[in-house]
Image (spheres, coloured by chain):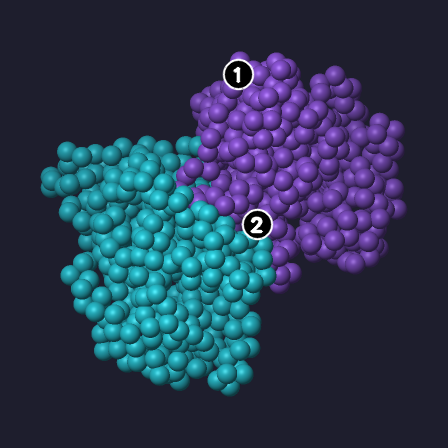
Chain colours: A cyan, B purple
Amino acid sequence: MTPCDLLIQCRWCIPVAPSGTVIEHAAIAVTGERIAGVGPRAEVEAGFSSETVVDLGRHAVIPGLVNAHGHAGMTLLRGAAEDLPLQEWLSEVIWPLEAANLSREFVRDGTGLALAEMLSMGITTFSDMYYFPDEVARCASRAGMRAEVAFPVVDFPNIWSRSADEALHKGMALHDEYMSDSRINMVFGPHAAYTVSRGALEKVAMYAEELNRPVQTHLHENAAEVAEARSRVGQSWIYYLHDLGLLSPALQAVHMTQLTGHELDLVALHNVNVIHCPHSNLKLASGICPVERLTEAGVNVALGTDGAASNNALDLLSEARLAALLAKQTGGDTTRADAPSMLHMATLGGARALGLDEQTGSLEPGKLADIVAFDLGAPRFVPVRDPVATLIHGAPAGAASHVWVGGRCLFDDGAYTTLDIDAIGARAERWRDIAH
Amino acid sequence: MTPCDLLIQCRWCIPVAPSGTVIEHAAIAVTGERIAGVGPRAEVEAGFSSETVVDLGRHAVIPGLVNAHGHAGMTLLRGAAEDLPLQEWLSEVIWPLEAANLSREFVRDGTGLALAEMLSMGITTFSDMYYFPDEVARCASRAGMRAEVAFPVVDFPNIWSRSADEALHKGMALHDEYMSDSRINMVFGPHAAYTVSRGALEKVAMYAEELNRPVQTHLHENAAEVAEARSRVGQSWIYYLHDLGLLSPALQAVHMTQLTGHELDLVALHNVNVIHCPHSNLKLASGICPVERLTEAGVNVALGTDGAASNNALDLLSEARLAALLAKQTGGDTTRADAPSMLHMATLGGARALGLDEQTGSLEPGKLADIVAFDLGAPRFVPVRDPVATLIHGAPAGAASHVWVGGRCLFDDGAYTTLDIDAIGARAERWRDIAH
């Protein structure tokens, strides 16, 4: 009998790997920040004992969800502009609001609000691309969450950098600073091919390869962007990034709603990761990422919420549900995007996109104890025949009951252990009536 | 100062009529089963006083949601068959499960579960089409909810009727029985043009007109159904129903994902009501109801959850959110299906479809006090700039805090006042492992 630090007993355990497995009446043993054992309760409890036992008799337990794309600071802009034409939304509301209000405090308050929301949704790892990435990293680190911080690289002067060169310089300094923090990954975040010069993108490609770091960028979000590429560089942005050597397994291409057959082949050939943000794409009428065509071609697809200004929730299971519904309808085939595939996309697929799939994304001995529980006892889930489908299709917004990151409980039966939720709410409210 | 039975104070009141109105720091006065006053708190409290005051300082208060199409009994079949081809789903799982298990107890237990879920989602009025409509009416009446019970008319013998004639006979007897129950409306529910003979549909048309009662039917759910019509009756089902005199303001046409321009004109000309069930339609890869084309033509559109076997939640605000996203994307226009229009569709549009818009669907003096409150204080809603958009796009599943139907509180800060939720859950669980 090996002592361990924590035993979680649950009605259903869905480890994601091996795929398709559901263990009823299961237990998970945690030692330090890692999983020591997973399996039927009798088996696990024959091998492990702990003074700390959490009994979740009505719950499904899954790997922590991975939100592979977002802008946490923008949570303060939730609802600031609804139902406007896209260009007006951006140039007359979002950008002026940012220009007039962005500050380190704005990012701190918005990120705090986003962390609270994401934890309540069962997200343990998130990727973020926004100004003051050092502040985002600090907030995530203090809260105990796992984060990929994509420091923003853009040509235009902004509150964090006067030029792309300065952004690269500051970002790489942050990368060094966070080398020793195992939960924070600093990666390159060139905003988009249309906002970063060719020279700066070449530097991103070079440095990212030298440092062996991922690169996240917005790519082919909508048809206007692709049309602009043809007039500006004579080819689509995907071909353009290919010429720059940026198509690789290190690339996280966000949105990708527009894809010709040849572009899809190129993406598959270079093992690019695609981040699908269905709510934001529909709300901004940008298009629909062809998830089924991509997965059939062997491309890894992850899910992202994008920012709350265009969503308006940071609810990854809701993204998985919408992605499944869209794939069924656009494919004209109800068997597509089945619930286990979508849960994989929301967990291990996300971890793989972020280069973290050897560490998190599934419940397996040796992996980090990033674990989430959902109480499936509410009337809207009953009767639970298929807990995977219940999670994906059962509208579980805000339903996570417990969240552990690296074995540490950050959300304990609805209560935050590292966040002062009242202070976060009060600080967020102060930004409600900002003007541009 | 007029005494009243209940004063509800709230942060935001969204009465739906007049359209586009949001009253901050509002109050609603209720006398008996009706609304006596609505407006800014100071104004209402200058006119009305009550010993019962409910203070909802972080809440948005709206008219009760109207779920215009569902099969409450089928809530017991939630998750029974996921990700199967449509025909296999129906003929190898759902129908055999019903054939082997349907009984009065099944309908009672499934309806009880559905009522509990719908109340928690803020639904005060629902339409239902299922076997044992007398049991559905009894459950709704006991729970205090408002229901349109569309008694099912089909040719094939089933557990409730041996023939369409018997179904009509039993249904009209029920209509007489419930004449004096102001909360229960018995209406005609011919299942679909392809399951009811021409002769029986002619009788439905005749009796419905004589009794001045609505008719609800599934119509143009998917392309296969329309193709079948051409081979069976030489025209689409919409033209076929038109020939039978069934296109009228009394008709509630459910689904309508396939519509030619001429069919749409016909629907508009006859003021047919259309019930849009977006989650079910996408999950079964049936198509997308052209909401924008319909509303531009002046057609009243309502929302329905359909049954939990194809959804899997009875969450009307989630239907409104998905309907908005689909309209924006398919129209290529972010200004379409704005949040106030979608809230109207989920409330007053539903009431109008059910012929109840003079009684419910908006918060106006003289109307029934069907009132719902949502607590918008959770991190996922903050900051609330636009409470209407927050409700539609903020993923509020299960978030209703208070529900009143006809002035009676049925859901009091998350607690059911007329339903024994533990007994309902236990009874529902007993049907989990049924086989066919």
**Subunit under mark 2:** B
Q: Quadrant of residue A98?
A: bottom left
The residue beneath circle 2 is: B322
Query: Who is closer to the viewer here, B436 or B36?
Result: B36
Which residue does the image show at 29% across and 61% down from the upper left? A133
- Look at the picture and state if A139 lies above or below B119: below
Q: Is residue B13 left or right of residue B161?
A: left
User: Looking at the picture, how far across and down is residue A123, in whole percent?
Assistant: 34, 49
| Front tag of 2 and 1 | 1
**Does residue A255 appear in the picture of this structure?**
yes
Residue A205: x and y, percent?
31, 79
Give SS at disc 2.
Answer: helix
Query: Could you tell me which residue is drawn at 88 percent across and 29 percent down?
Result: B210
Quadrant assignment for the N terminus of chain A? top left
Q: Which residue matches tag 1?
A: B52
Q: Amino acid at mark 2?
A: Leu
Q: Position of residue B317 (x, y in %)?
A: 56, 41
The 10 Å Cα crowd at callout 1, few under 14, some 14 to 19, many 20 or more, is few
Mark 2 neighbour class, 10 Å CA radius: few under 14, some 14 to 19, many 20 or more: many
Do marks 2 and 1 share a chain? yes
Q: Nearer the viewer, residue B227 or A224?
A: A224
Q: Chain of mark 1?
A: B
Q: Secondary structure at mark 1?
A: loop
| Residue B117 appearing in the image | no
Give me the disc on residue B243.
none
Task: Mark 2 or mark 1: name the one nearer the start of the chain.
Answer: 1
Amino acid type at mark 1 = Thr
Q: Please report the residue visible at 84 percent of the width from the left and 55 percent of the height from the top.
A: B234
Left or right: A42 in relation to B80: left
Q: Is residue B339 above or below residue B376?
A: below
Please say if the residues under marks 2 and 1 sit with CB atoms less than 8 Å apart.
no
Real-space Cα distance between discs 2 and 1? 37 Å
